[in-house]
Amino acid sequence: MSHQFETPTGKLRLTPESRPPDHPSAIWTAFARQGQWKSWVIAAQLLLMALLTLSAMQLSRRPPDVVLVDPDGKSTYLNASTAGDELKRWLAERRQRPSDVTVAHFCREFLRRFLAVNSTTIHSEWPEALSMMSPSLHARMDAEAAKQKLVETYRAAQVSTEVDIQQLELVEQLERAAHVRALVVRTRQPLAGGPVSADTLAVDLVLDVVPRTATAPDGLQVAEYRNAAPAAPKPAESVPHAP
């Protein structure tokens, strides 16, 4: 006995319970909104960082506003908010070029730090002398001092040094440089007392004019330093006496 299976002709219909939703669920909507919010936050942070970077670059390039020079040549850096319009206009006209008094003060301070080497102060005075040099001269002098163990040697020597700047001459002053010549008498004496030794140096300094900053208020750097014993004076010619 054979059985025949009839193929159903009706169509499959989806009930409302089995039909897929037309919109994502609430949790997926929340995730999408959170992702969009994070993207806007990141974009805003990047924009703020770019603005801060541009502001920092502009501030770093801006020259100092005001530098006051005392009668003895000492310079003092002031903030722009403390200066009047007339003073800032006058300084702009001067283009912050160091005066003769400032050049003299800078050279005296450098020679005192560089040549008056004392065993008790060399640890602080030597870095200050290097900071007054141009980067190339700074590197050359620092390497030479490290090679000769200058700081260690002077600290162990227990000596005191004083300098007397007998002459200071501004040989030439250009727009961006200056040449100064000095005659320095240097005396040394042991800290515990003892004989005093002295020598005389003829010093030539070449200065670079640099932008004035809080660390370089004088607007100068030592680009070249040379010293030597001064030339011996020529003997005076004898004048014949009348018989």
Image: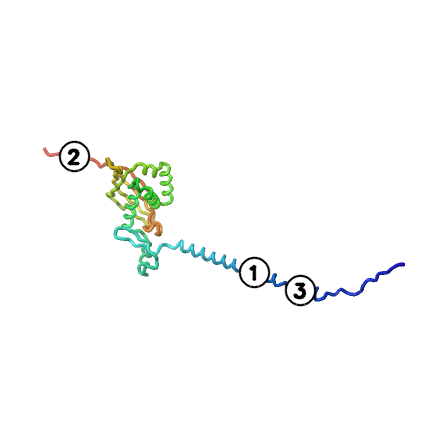
Between discs 3 and 1, the one toward the N terminus? 3
Element under disc 1: helix
Residue at x 40%, y 55% (from the top left corner): 59
Element under disc 3: loop
| Left or right of residue 47, residue 25 in this image | right
Q: Nearer the viewer, residue 194 or 168?
A: 194
Residue at x 21%, y 36% (from the top left corner): 234
As shown in the figure, which amino acid type bears the numbered disc 1? Gln
In front: label 2 or label 3: 3
Q: In the rendered image, which quarter is residue 32 located in?
A: bottom right
Between discs 2 and 3, the one toward the N terminus? 3
Q: Nearer the viewer, residue 17 or 47?
A: 17
Between discs 2 and 1, the one toward the N terminus? 1
Label 1 sits on residue: 34
Q: What is the number of the mark on residue 238?
A: 2
| Left or right of residue 15, residue 234 in this image | left
Mark-to-mark CA distance, 3 and 1 = 22 Å
Say few, some or many: other residues with alpha carbon within 10 Å of mark 1 (under 14 / 14 to 19 / 20 or more). Answer: few
Residue that extends furthest to the top in the rendered view of this protein = 243
Q: What is the number of the mark on residue 192?
A: none
Task: Where is residue 161? Give x, y as percent.
Answer: 27, 40
Say few, some or many: other residues with alpha carbon within 10 Å of mark 3 (under 14 / 14 to 19 / 20 or more). Answer: few
Q: In the rendered image, which quarter is residue 63 located in?
A: bottom left
Task: Where is residue 75? Give x, y as percent.
Answer: 30, 52
Residue 131: in sight, yes or no?
A: yes
Task: Where is residue 153? Give x, y as percent.
Answer: 33, 36
In front: label 2 or label 1: 1
As shown in the figure, which amino acid type bears the numbered disc 2? Ser
Query: Are dots 2 and 1 in contact, CB under 8 Å?
Result: no
Mark-to-mark CA distance, 2 and 1 = 103 Å
As shown in the figure, which amino acid type bears the numbered disc 3? Pro
Label 3 sits on residue: 21
